[in-house]
Image (cartoon, helix red, strand yellow):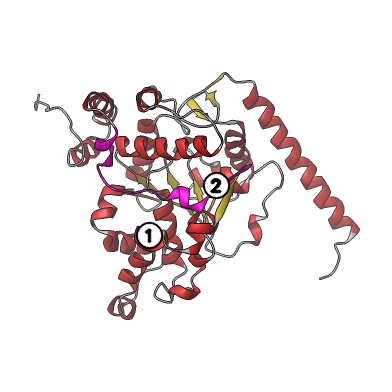
């Protein structure tokens, strides 16, 4: 490899300084905002649109907004934390890269050595960090990214689609299951680091008050729902519960949306079912990358096993009291019914919602 020319070295140094200055400006700004504990192992900071998770993640989100340049072939996975993020990442990566990494050739698949969060990296957790500016231009198409940011805090180059052509895949999950799964994840971290565990009643209080890692659950879902209704060709909206009922159908929809339709020979050869099996909970938890690997998220190293729990629909009933559930359901109905009644109609299948009159 040829050494960099003096002019290139100077340009690289200037770019690094510019990035460092941008990161510091954003850090100073976020650090000046009100903060408080919430449903997270980090302090939450008061953004104009709600409470959000930690200085580092907010800063990463802001820097990504400034610097990320979208390509027409880019695909961004967006979720609330613990809403099926690991599964949708695995399904998307396996679907897009199935020709160079066939799902039924499991012994040679990247999932044997890398977790889904290493295969599809978060913009705010992993790419736009204080210690380095990512060289995303060097990545081959299609580039796959992930985020937990609300729709209106996505990088402007992503929101500018269709002019950029960038596409977004969003997964939402029943709010009570989302809360319970997040609580278990947070408390796993707290236990590993000798911190006090968050009690269920406290977690419900934080959740209902919108003091969650990436803003209120309901506004997060509604932001992507509205974007999907306005631009369905650019924003794909999945419900976790439907994915569980029909994973093969959702893999086909994902492939079509991403521009990687399964061919007739692939369908006949069982490629869709092989993808579902490869990315299934039972298979993924048995891989060495899950059992012994880890993923670096900002300054924290997280065991890959921590990203896998049970993934069952309705498990909230084993952890949340009926009174707590009713409180969450009432907020869900009040938030969703005016602008997204079909979401309420869907979630009537998996949660208790009071009867409404036609009037």
Q: SS for tag 2?
A: strand
Residue 164 appears in the figure? no
Residue 146 is left or right of residue 262, and the answer is: right
Magenta extent: 299-319
Q: Residue at x 51, y 29 (%)?
A: 52
In which quadrant is the C terminus drawn? top left
Residue 89 is left or right of residue 173, and the answer is: right
Residue 235 position (above or below residue 178): below
Residue sitting farthest toward the top: 34
Residue 112 shows which numbered tag? none
In which quadrant is the N terminus drawn? bottom right
**Depth check: 223 or 238 in front?**
238
| Residue at mark 2 | 302
Quarter of the image where one finds residue 264: bottom left
Quarter of the image where one finds residue 57: top right
Q: Residue at x 46, y 30 (%)?
A: 197
Q: SS for tag 1?
A: helix
Q: Nearer the viewer, mark 1 or mark 2?
A: 2
**Depth check: 186 or 275 in front?**
186
């Amino acid at each position: 490899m040829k050494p960099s020319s003096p002019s290139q070295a100077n340009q690289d140094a200037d770019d690094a300084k510019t990035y460092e200055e941008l990161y510091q400006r954003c850090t100073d700004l976020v650090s000046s905002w009100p903060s408080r504990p919430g449903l997270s192992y980090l302090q939450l900071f008061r953004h104009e649109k709600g409470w959000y998770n930690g200085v580092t993640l907010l800063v990463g989100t802001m820097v990504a907004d400034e610097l990320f340049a979208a390509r027409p072939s880019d695909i961004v996975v967006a979720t609330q934390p613990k809403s099926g993020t690991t599964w949708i990442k695995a399904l998307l990566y396996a679907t897009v890269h199935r020709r160079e990494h066939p799902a039924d050739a499991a012994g040679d698949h990247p999932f044997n050595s890398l977790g889904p969060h290493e295969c599809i990296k978060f913009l705010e957790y992993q790419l736009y960090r204080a210690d380095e500016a990512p060289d995303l231009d060097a990545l081959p198409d299609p580039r796959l990214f992930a985020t937990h940011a609300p729709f209106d805090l996505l990088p402007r180059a992503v929101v500018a689609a269709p002019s950029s052509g960038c596409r977004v895949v969003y997964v939402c999950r029943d709010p009570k299951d989302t809360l319970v799964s997040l609580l278990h994840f947070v408390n796993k971290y707290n236990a590993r680091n000798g911190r006090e565990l968050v009690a269920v009643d406290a977690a419900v209080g934080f959740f209902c008050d919108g003091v969650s890692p990436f803003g209120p659950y309901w506004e997060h879902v509604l932001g992507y729902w509205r974007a999907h209704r306005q631009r369905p060709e650019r924003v794909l909206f999945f419900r976790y519960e439907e994915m569980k009922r029909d994973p093969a159908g959702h893999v086909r929809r994902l492939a079509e949306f991403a521009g990687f339709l399964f061919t007739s020979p692939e369908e006949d050869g069982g490629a869709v079912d092989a993808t579902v099996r490869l990315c299934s909970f039972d298979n993924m938890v048995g891989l060495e990358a899950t059992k012994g690997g880890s993923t670096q998220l900002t300054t924290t190293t997280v065991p890959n096993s921590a990203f896998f729990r049970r993934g069952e629909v309705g498990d909230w009933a084993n952890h949340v009291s009926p009174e707590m559930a009713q409180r969450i359901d009432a907020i869900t109905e009040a938030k969703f019914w005016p602008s997204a009644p079909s979401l309420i109609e869907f979630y009537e299948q998996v949660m208790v919602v009071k009867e409404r009159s036609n009037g």
